[in-house]
């Protein structure tokens, strides 16, 4: 029997289905595409002067903002917008900025901050990172520290901005230990020195009576190992750069070269000279036990651990000229990885593990380059009369090295370069400087 | 007996004769006249602007003139100021509850950056490497059986798909067309008209097929040029994608981001500005992905307003754009 109610329900169902289909069609109607091109232009960032709040020092507040700005600009990934171009009056960190004012000047990021004094000789720093395009806050934090640490506040803020905008860890709150060189070329005084990565807060760590060479930071703390020649006898030294406490790791027969920490900071790897040859040894800092890793009739030196400690890269002339080799941490499976023309030396494994930096000598020039751990993808980043001793920033994106200028008045200076090879900057030092070693991030 | 045999032979002969004659006659019918394909050199934009046919014809001139007239004033009328106009007018800032207070609760004892350590997962390269296409080995052309053998199989001919036939057929068609009245509209006559294969033996080309008819025939196939233009052309779409790409700053930390493909959905107004906040529809639990997703949203917002044809607004009012970082980095 025909049921009109059932028929009605059927009609309703059909109508509903049609409406749903129409809605679904309307919903699904969107153009779809894939963007496969982008740009590598620096991020346009606006950093107005920080405000001084609560009786704070306005000059210091501005100085902190300038530290942040200088760090980010030096990275090559940010383009600082001229403060003269700002149209916004409201730069109070406690209020939402008027985004249109910043979009007008095409700012892609905005940093607002305030510095206030606190009792007990402390300062409080607040900052906010805004995205004027999307109109939202990306980061915000407040710090409190002693007044003398005001530069570190700037570096820390710069690190946070850098990481939030690029996805990379920042490297601004770090230090560099290096050999400070003074005096005439033939009678140079070489002292161990340390400074912030931007060249500020320089401190000399040794007196200069003894020759010092090849300082290297521990990857896990603020210890430095270096070679010291007291009375012409080489010894491997350890120094805590915070306290200045020193320790003699040992005197070894013959010459010792290039000590470097293992990733866990518990061992030191170095090369010991034995007649015309030198081999690699590992020294356990707790037991002071030595372990031989290479045994060839060649000069094996310049060892550097992979960040996981499983492998070691080093240089050797076992096949004629200096070339790079990789072996397991126990000395097994030694294999050559460099096959390009010229001589390769001073290999350093990136903290990210993806690249090995090196010095290459070819056609009378010294080049700084990188290659993958299997030897592929060699790229030269910079070259010149004499470039040597690359060291990695903790984020594995920037290298520092020294460049020597020829002539009687010439000498070594420190430079940094990023992995693109385009952003090369001189690192300011008061005198000549060589053998830089980048610290891990400060605690 | 002999009479029967004679009659039988006579009948068979008769059937055979009829068959030969009738098959000969039907042969031209069985051979389908190949529909000529109009081939012309044109740019991609013209092709992708193929429009639906319309009952009411309008002079094609208007349709041709329209796009340039529309396209020109767009950027001029609303260049940079449009951006600002699209943006909300400067208001007095709402007095917000000071979020710093919340932060103060988290006040660290030491100045300390607390960024979560991003674990850069190196995923294996998942690109599907296209296998090198092997050249399709075509069997060597077999010698065709004699045409006589093919004749007694008219069924196969009927089933066979129309394929470019030998010139013979065309010639026959042409001859037929020449015989027919030129005033009759016929696809065959159009075919003959458009056939550009030089044929010395063919008779004179039918002259009475006028330009009007030619246009009518083309319109019948492709649609009138003034019809509804509801699809974006490849050029328009590419320009839109390029416009976004120009504003996309590849995050420096994206080097290891093999699988970073943030997809963003957003709506647009008729003037090409973005309506509301673009939404990232996929998510990967990684700080690097977050950076890439934010850069994607920023690119979409920064590049507005988009230069898209207003008459196709229904087509582009909603967009779903994927940012392929792997392709950008050339991995």
Image (tube, rainbow, N blue to C red):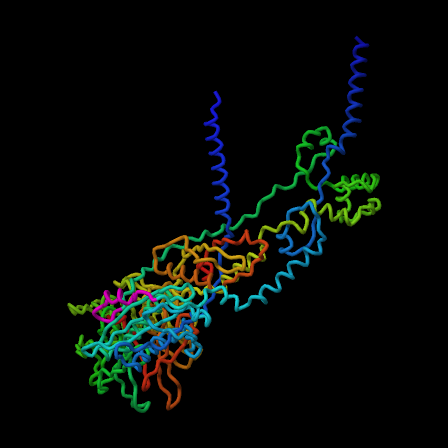
Query: In x, y percent, where is residue B38?
Result: 70, 48
Query: With A216 as the anchor, is A17 left or right in this view?
Result: right
| Number of residue marks | 0
Query: With B158 as the anchor, is A22 left or right in this view?
Result: left
Residues B260 and A257: in front is B260
Dividing the picture into quarters, in which one does residue A345 lie? bottom left
Q: Residue at x 72, y 36 (%)?
A: B32
Dividing the picture into quarters, in which one does residue A95 lie? bottom left
Vertical arrangement, residue B5 with respect to residue B231, above or below: above
Residue B191 belongs to the span the image colors magenta = no
Vertical arrangement, residue A229 with respect to residue A72, above or below: below
Vertical arrangement, residue A249 with respect to residue B99, above or below: below
Q: Residue at x 47, y 53 (%)?
A: B320
Q: Residue at x 84, y 44 (%)?
A: B203
Dividing the picture into quarters, in which one does residue A316 lie? bottom left
* Residue B247 seen by the camera: yes
Query: With A26 as the anchor, is A62 left or right in this view?
Result: left
* Residue A324 seen by the camera: no
Query: With B95 as the anchor, is B145 left or right in this view?
Result: right
Query: In x, y percent, where is residue A392?
Result: 33, 71
Q: Residue at x 47, y 63 (%)?
A: A38
Q: Which residues are magenta?
A: B95-112
Query: In x, y percent, where is residue B7?
Result: 80, 13
Position of the C terminus of chain A, as image quadrant, is bottom left
Farthest residue to the top: give it: B1
Q: What is the chief secondary structure element of the magenta stretch?
A: loop
Query: In x, y percent, where is residue A282?
Result: 23, 68
Residues A289 and B160: in front is B160
Residue B96 belongs to the span the image colors magenta = yes
Vertical arrangement, residue A197 with respect to residue B158, above or below: below
């Amino acid at each position: 029997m025909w049921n009109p109610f059932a028929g009605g329900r059927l009609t309703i169902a059909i109508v509903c289905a049609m409406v749903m289909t129409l809605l679904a069609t309307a919903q699904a109607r969107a153009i779809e595409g894939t963007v496969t091109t982008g740009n590598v232009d620096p991020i346009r960032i606006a950093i107005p002067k920080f405000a001084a709040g609560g009786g704070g020092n306005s000059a210091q507040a501005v100085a902190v903002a300038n530290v942040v700005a200088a760090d980010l600009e030096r990275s090559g990934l940010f383009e600082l917008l001229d403060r003269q171009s700002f149209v916004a009056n409201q730069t109070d960190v406690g209020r939402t900025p008027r985004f249109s004012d910043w979009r007008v000047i095409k700012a892609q990021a905005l940093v607002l901050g305030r510095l206030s004094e606190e009792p007990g000789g402390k300062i409080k720093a607040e900052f906010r990172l805004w995205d004027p395009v999307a109109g939202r806050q990306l980061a915000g934090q407040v710090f409190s520290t002693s007044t003398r640490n005001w530069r570190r506040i700037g570096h820390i803020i710069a690190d946070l901005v850098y990481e939030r905008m690029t996805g990379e860890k920042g490297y601004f709150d770090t230090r560099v230990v290096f050999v400070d060189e003074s005096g005439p070329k033939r009678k140079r005084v070489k002292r161990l020195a340390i400074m912030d990565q931007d060249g500020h807060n320089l401190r000399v760590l040794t007196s200069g009576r003894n020759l010092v060479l090849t300082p290297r930071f521990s990857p896990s703390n603020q210890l430095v190992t270096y070679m010291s020649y007291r009375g012409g006898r080489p010894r491997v030294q350890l120094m805590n750069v915070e306290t200045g406490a020193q320790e003699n790791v040992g005197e070894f027969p013959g010459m010792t070269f290039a000590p470097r920490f293992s990733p866990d900071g518990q061992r030191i790897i170095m090369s010991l000279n034995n007649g015309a040859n030198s081999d690699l040894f590992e020294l356990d800092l707790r037991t002071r036990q030595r372990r031989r890793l290479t045994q060839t009739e060649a000069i094996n030196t310049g060892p550097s651990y992979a960040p996981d400690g499983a492998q070691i890269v080093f240089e050797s002339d076992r096949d004629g000229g200096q070339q790079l080799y990789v072996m397991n941490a126990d000395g097994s499976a030694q294999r050559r990885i460099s096959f390009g023309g010229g001589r390769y030396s001073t290999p350093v494994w990136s903290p990210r593990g993806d690249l090995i930096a090196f010095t290459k000598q070819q056609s009378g020039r010294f080049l700084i380059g990188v290659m993958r751990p299997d030897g592929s993808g060699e790229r030269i980043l910079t070259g010149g009369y004499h470039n040597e001793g690359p060291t990695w920033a903790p984020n594995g994106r920037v290298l520092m090295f020294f460049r020597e200028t020829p002539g009687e008045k010439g000498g070594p200076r420190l430079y940094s370069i990023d992995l693109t090879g385009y952003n090369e900057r001189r690192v300011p030092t008061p005198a000549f400087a060589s053998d830089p070693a980048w610290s891990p991030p400060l605690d | 007996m002999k009479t029967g045999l004679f009659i039988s032979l006579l009948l068979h002969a008769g059937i055979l004769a009829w068959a030969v004659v009738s098959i000969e006659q039907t042969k031209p019918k069985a051979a389908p006249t190949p529909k000529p394909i109009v081939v012309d050199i044109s740019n991609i934009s013209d092709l992708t602007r193929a429009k639906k046919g319309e009952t009411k014809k309008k002079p094609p001139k208007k349709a041709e003139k329209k796009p340039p007239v529309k396209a020109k004033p767009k950027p001029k009328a609303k260049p940079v100021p449009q951006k600002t106009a699209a943006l909300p007018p400067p208001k007095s800032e709402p007095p917000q509850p000071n979020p710093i207070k919340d932060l103060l609760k988290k006040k660290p004892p030491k100045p300390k950056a607390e960024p979560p350590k991003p674990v850069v997962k190196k995923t294996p390269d998942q690109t599907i490497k296209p296998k090198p296409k092997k050249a399709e080995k075509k069997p060597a052309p077999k010698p065709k059986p004699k045409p006589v053998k093919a004749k007694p199989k008219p069924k196969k001919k009927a089933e066979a798909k129309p394929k470019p036939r030998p010139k013979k057929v065309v010639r026959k068609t042409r001859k037929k067309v020449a015989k027919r009245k030129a005033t009759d509209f016929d696809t065959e006559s159009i075919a003959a008209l458009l056939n550009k294969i030089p044929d010395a033996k063919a008779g004179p080309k039918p002259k009475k097929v006028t330009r009007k008819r030619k246009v009518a025939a083309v319109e019948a196939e492709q649609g009138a040029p003034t019809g509804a233009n509801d699809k974006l052309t490849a050029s328009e779409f590419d320009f839109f994608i390029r416009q976004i790409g120009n504003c996309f700053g590849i995050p420096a930390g994206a080097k290891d981001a093999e699988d970073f493909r943030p997809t963003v959905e957003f709506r647009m107004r008729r003037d090409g500005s973005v309506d509301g906040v673009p939404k990232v529809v996929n998510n990967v639990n990684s700080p690097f992905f977050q950076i890439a997703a934010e850069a994607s949203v920023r690119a979409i917002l920064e590049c507005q307003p988009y230069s898209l044809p207003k008459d196709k607004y229904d087509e582009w009012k909603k967009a779903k754009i994927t940012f392929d970082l792997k392709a950008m980095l050339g991995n």
